[in-house]
Every structure is written in C-alpha cells, then in structure tokens.
Image (cartoon, rainbow, N blue to C red):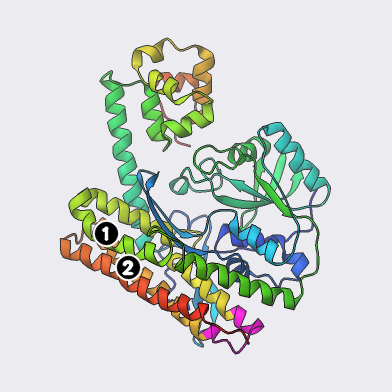
Amino acid sequence: MKIDFEHRQAAHCESGVTSNLLWNASGGKITEPLAFGIGAGLFFAYIPLIKVNNGPAIAFRTMPGFIFNRTCKSLNIPVARKKFSSKEKAQTFLDECLDNGHAVGCQVGVYYLPYFPKEYRFHFNGHNLIVYGKEGDNYLVSDPIMENTNILDSYQLERVRFAKGALSPKGHIYYPKENKDITNEQIKQAIKSGIKKNVYNMLSIPGSFAGISGIKNTGLKIKKWRDKLGLEKAGLYLAQMVRMQEEIGTGGGGFRYIYGAFLQEADVYLPGNQLTEISSIFTKAGDMWRTAAVHAAGIYKGRIGSQEDFNTMGDYLLEIAAVEKAAFETLKKIKWQ
Amino acid sequence: MKKDDVPQDLSSLGKITKEVCYATDSNGKYVTELSSGWDVKITALDTAWGDIEKRIAAAKQQVIDGKASPLLFFIEYRLMDIAILAGYTGFWKWQIKRHLNPNVFKSLSDKKLQKYAEAFNIKVEDLKTMTVHED
C-alpha cells in the first residue's frame, strides 16, 4: 500500500522529516527553515569526554529528536511516538501505521543503510527518514537528504531501526496524530518561542561546553591541540570538526545558513523586527565557519601546521563567537511588533 | 554564502545524490542550491578514512602475530568499538574482551561465532579466516 505523500529533498534530515510530515497539514507553510528555527535547531557543543570515531563529539545542532518535538509542540500538534524492545512489535506497529494511512518518521543508524555510499557510513544513530508505504516485503522510504526515494526490505529497515551504539534508536517511530490546520497566528507564536529557546541555548546554558561559550572555549583549546595531541591527531580532530560542520545534512556553514533562511522567512510573518538584518549576521557567521574550515583543511592536508597556524585557527572561532553572541543578543532584545 | 559560490567538487556522495545547500541570491534572499560536494570536506573525510585504514592494518598485524583474535580486526573494519559490538551481539563487554584472546576465540561455539558474524554482516568462515569481501 502507498500513502499520499510527496518526497521533498531537504538539507537536514530531521527538519526535512518534520517539514515533510507536516506538509499536508500546514498546506506547505512549514518549510524546512521554519521547522529548523521553530524547533530551535541551532547549537554548538564540544564534549571531549564523549568519543565519536575516536575524536571528540562536536555538534552544531541540537539533540536528535528535539526539532520535531518542539516544532509540533509549538504548533499544538499532537504527536505519537514509540520505542520498542522487540523488533517484531516495532515492525507490526509500523505496518499498522501505514495501514491507517500515516506516513511515519523513523530514527535510524546510518552504518548499515544500504543506499548511503560506503565512505559516509559511520555508527551515527541520529539520522531520520520517512516510511510512506509497503509493497510486498519492501518499504518505501523518503530520506530527506537524498534527491530520490529509496526502497529497503524488511530486514534492511529493521537493521537500521535497531542500530546499536550511542543514541541507539530502539525502533523509534513518530508522526503527527492528526492533520490539524495550522494558522498564521500559531506560526507567529511558534517562531517567537523558537527564537527565545535558541537564544537561551546559545547564551545561557551554564558551563563552557555549549553555546557561545562553547565556541569560545573550543577556540582556546584548539590553540593547545598541537602541543597536547601532536600534529597528526590535532589534524584528525579538526577534520572531524569540519565534517560535523559541513557534511551532508548541515545545509553548509554549520547550519548557520539554514538559520539565516529561517529568519528571512520569519520576517514575512513578523515584519518590523529587523529579522532580515539579523539574518545577514548569520550568513556572515556561516561564511566565517567556512573560512575557518578552509584553514583547517590546510592543516589536515599537511600543507600548513605551525603553532601560528593553530593560533589562527583558534582565533577564527573566537571571532565567530563574538559575531554570534552579538546576533543572539540582538534577537534576545527584540520587542515584538 | 552566495548561490554562485556553492561548491561543485564531485564527491563519492555526489555520484549518488546532490545535497541541498542554503545560499543567498543577488538580492540577498535565501534560496536552495544543489551541491555535488566540496573539496574541503572530501579531504576531511579522506583524513578520517586514512586513520581508519591505519587502525585496520594495525589490528590485522596483531591478529597475524597471534596477539589478538580476528574479532579485533573486524571491530576496526566495521568502525565499531566494544560497546557497539556488545549492543549488536548481546554479549557483555567483559565477554567480548575475553573473546579477543586468540586462544579463547578458538574455543567459541558456532552459536557464538554466528552472533559475531551477524553483527559484522559476514560469514562465520570469513570471521575465522579474517577474510573480507568488498560490499
């Protein structure tokens, strides 16, 4: 069986899934950038204690699952979600959803995802896709980062839904329970609360691992990496940072461009609040992240690698922290018109 | 980033799908543009894989020297660690650490070997002989 569902490619998996699942209900109003911004998707965190592929965990976006949750909650859309200990029950539940005409979001691991090229398969379990039908033993899959739809047989789908390791999905499945109309007034309120939440996440989380202070702290740490880790390992860490920042699923510039697009779209709903002007600061921040990435590439390619080069690298992050801090403080001070 | 500056350096992903980037047009308005890859991230990925290849080669040598069982090789080959392997097989971490000893590994039952083979997506025979087939 097949559900009335249209595949739309997106930059980021979760905001893409959210936008696509809400497409019919919202009449196409909840675009990917709106879902990302309402879901307060922008973030930075550096957690050296958690190791990902033998490097430190670095994130440019919020925790997997938060964007869908927060967006639906802000728009007052009831959500069904479930995790499973039994693979059989997970499949039965999925089949029932499809029989009832629900396209559903699934959290999956990418390591055994057959349509991904081998080079991109790591044990990353925060990926999201939509299942929108079943033909025989084959499930119809809309992965928002892919140009086209794909097919997974029941074993392949089970394997990625029950991938193991950090953030293991445990068959996690979610969908909006009903197709309620979404009004412009609701979208306006949701935009405001999304911005407020993102301001908090970037400016006010205590400690120095997250938000603006996280960026600053990472910049200071990078300057010491060469001595502390040696050139080779320091290069690997920088390569890891660049991948988290720029790889497929980010929309470029560590998600800063998607956020810029969000603010431009938000300006249409809430004009007179300078959101377009603030958007251009995020564009600048995204450009600065990319400039930093080019410099980092010089280091991990082995073209440069002096202490001076590491100082420059750290300074890039300090400058970015200053620019993003100003942007979020401006957002914080908005008196909504 | 300006729309015209969205890089088009062909990556291994670009052969399968282009990716969506957000960029600004000549009026400063955000639009989406497809990219087939960017040299900076291609080399970032190459750097990560260069390190993985080294780890795999080191593990292989350990197995050949009789210092570790083929499990170590496949853990590296499948980019896993003991915690991930414990997740896939249902074994405790301390059990896996024991099975990394070549002598203990030799005495494992077929049932246990089968669990490992399934986790690595290989055949039991290949697990024992440290044989890989490109997939």
Return the x and y of residue A303 as percentages of the image width and height.
Answer: 20, 60
- The residue type indicated by label 2 comes to Leu
- Vertical comparison of A256 with B24: above or below: above
Check if residue A268 falls in the magenta segment.
yes
In this view, the residue farthest toward the right is: A100
For label 1, the SS is helix
Where are the magenta residues, as a range? A265-276
Q: Chain of mark 1?
A: A
Relative side of A207 to B34, left or right: left
Task: Give the residue type at disc 1.
Answer: Ile
Res B40 → quadrant: bottom left
Q: Position of residue A223 (x, y in %)?
A: 23, 61
The residue drawn where x is 23% and y is 54% is: A225
Q: Determine the CA span between mark 2 and mark 1.
A: 9 Å
Q: Is residue B2 visible?
A: no
Quadrant of the image occupied by residue A184: bottom right
Q: Is residue A46 above or below residue B64?
A: below
Picture coordinates of residue A246 (x, y %)?
43, 62
Q: Is residue B117 visible?
A: yes
The residue at the point 26 percent across, 69 percent down is: A315
Q: Which of the numbered marks, if any, corresponds to residue A317?
A: 2
Residue A82 screen position, x and y as percent = 70, 44
The residue indicated by pointer 1 is A222
Q: Residue furthest top?
A: B107
Mark 1 burial class by Cα count in 10 Å: few <14, some 14-19, many 20+: many
User: SS for tag 2?
Assistant: helix
Query: Pointers 2 and 1 in contact (CB under 8 A)?
Result: yes
Residue at horizontal 61%, vertical 54%?
A143
Residue B44 placement, left or right of B25: left
Label 2 Cα neighbours within 10 Å, binned few <14 / some 14-19 / many ≥20: many
